[in-house]
Image: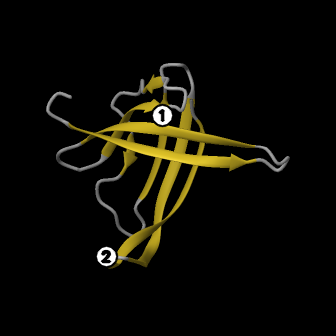
């Protein structure tokens, strides 16, 4: 899009209700990456029904910081074209060494919260 890097992030999960029921959901978030800061700016979300909701904020809100460090913090409000709003926050609270079949590597430990959405 206009010379920018476009990225997609898919996610899925199952919500289990205290009543015993559940719901499986999936979504794809679409981003533009700022070539200078490397921040990811969200511009659309596709839900599990295939409906795409476009972001109406301008400038586009930052979803993921391009640089991370202990204490990095971000609070975002995203407005969608269907009138819904999603708020989220992310704070880097530490580091953690994770082991995998390819070896160990250091990751960031975060505290996150969100509400609303399409």
CA distance for labels 2 and 1: 37 Å
Residue positioned 41% across, 69% down in the render: 108
Find residue 54 and report its horizontal and vertical position in percent: 42, 24
| Above or below 115: residue 91 | below
Q: What is the total number of numbered labels drawn onto the structure image?
A: 2
Find residue 14 and report its horizontal and vertical position in percent: 64, 48
Q: Is residue 15 left or right of residue 93?
A: right
Residue positioned 79% across, 44% down in the render: 21
Residue positioned 14% across, 32% down in the render: 3
| Quadrant the C terminus occupies | top right
Mark 1 lies on residue: 78
Tell me the colour scheme of the image.
Answer: secondary structure
Q: Secondary structure at mark 2?
A: loop
Residue positioned 54% across, 27% down in the render: 49
| Quadrant the N terminus occupies | top left
Q: Secondary structure at mark 1?
A: strand
Q: Tag 2: Cα neighbours inside 10 Å, few (<14), some, or many (≥20)?
A: few
Find residue 78 and report its horizontal and vertical position in percent: 48, 34
Find residue 45 and report its horizontal and vertical position in percent: 45, 32
Camera-side residue of 83 and 53: 53
Mark 2 lies on residue: 102
């Amino acid at each position: 899009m206009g010379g920018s890097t476009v990225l997609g992030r898919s996610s899925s999960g199952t919500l289990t209700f205290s009543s015993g029921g559940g719901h499986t959901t999936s979504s794809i978030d679409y981003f533009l990456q700022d070539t200078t800061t490397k921040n990811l700016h969200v511009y659309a979300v596709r839900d599990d029904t295939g409906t795409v909701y476009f972001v109406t904020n301008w400038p586009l809100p930052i979803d993921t910081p391009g640089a991370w460090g202990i204490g990095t913090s971000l609070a975002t409000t995203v407005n969608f074209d269907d009138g819904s709003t999603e708020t989220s926050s992310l704070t880097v609270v530490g580091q953690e060494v994770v082991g995998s079949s390819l070896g160990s590597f250091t990751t960031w430990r975060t505290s996150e919260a969100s509400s609303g959405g399409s």
